[in-house]
Amino acid sequence: MDSSFFRGLFRLLGLLLWGAAAAMAWAGVSALRIHMNYQHFCDNPFLEVLGCLVVSTAPLLLLTGGLAVGISRWNTGPWQGLRDWETHVLDDLLHQYGNQSDPKTKAVDRLQEKLQCCGIHNYTDWRVMGHFSAPTSCCQKIFSNCTGDLSTSQQLYQKGCLPKLEQLRKVVLSHMFWCCIGALVLELFAALISGFLMKQSPLSDYNILESGPRWRPKSRW
């Protein structure tokens, strides 16, 4: 899936979040107005607390939706800038690779082992940088006798770390999108349940109108 697909997903997510923010703001304000107008007849603070909570979440949804729409409007410039920055970082790490006690060397080995990649674009990057062999972290786990020799390239990971990082970033963005969609579905479900419960609950708080002393007209006889 290309970046245009994810931009479309984030645009849709932003619009959904804006719609949810508007709906929650309207519901919260309505609950507060009802409580203010009828607080003398109902001393239960449920509507006031619920309205405050709903209104307080609306700005967060609005901000998140704006962020999602902003990401969707990015052209290839920022993504290309991120790719160039990752390429520069990987190039710097590979050039300084050597001392096994160096944290940068350990970082390269850990990256190649975890993502199962070799070099920036592929294993030939190690030859271009003047190395006679690739690190053993480039070796596929099925080859126990692999030494990183570039002449036995079939024993090395064929893909570079830069494409693997791009793929990982897309997976993370996809997970973020579907998590937000799940949160929206849960909020809608909670709103439906709340409306159903409020519709079914008896208006017991208004019994105060019946519990007070009743006025009776004086008899003329």
Image (cartoon, rainbow, N blue to C red):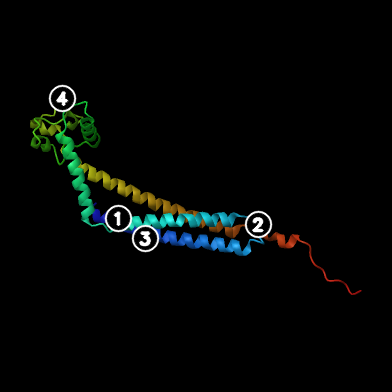
Kind of residue indicated by mark 4? Asn
Q: Which residue in the structure is indicated by mark 3? A: 15
Tell me where residue 199 sits by quadrant.
bottom right
Kind of residue indicated by mark 1? Ile
Kind of residue indicated by mark 2? Asp
Q: Which residue in the structure is indicated by mark 1? A: 71
Q: Is residue 165 left or right of residue 43?
A: left
Q: In the image, residue 132 lies at what x, y percent?
A: 8, 30
Q: Is residue 6 left or right of residue 160?
A: right
Q: Is residue 14 left or right of residue 128?
A: right
Q: In the image, residue 81 lies at what x, y percent?
A: 21, 50
Q: Which residue in the structure is indicated by mark 4? A: 145
Q: Which residue in the structure is indicated by mark 2? A: 43
Q: Is residue 160 visible?
A: no
Q: Describe the element under mark 3 as helix, strand or loop.
A: helix
Determine the CA span between mark 2 and mark 3: 38 Å
User: Which of these two is toward me, 214 or 40?
Assistant: 40
Q: Describe the element under mark 1 as helix, strand or loop.
A: helix
Determine the CA span between mark 4 and mark 3: 55 Å
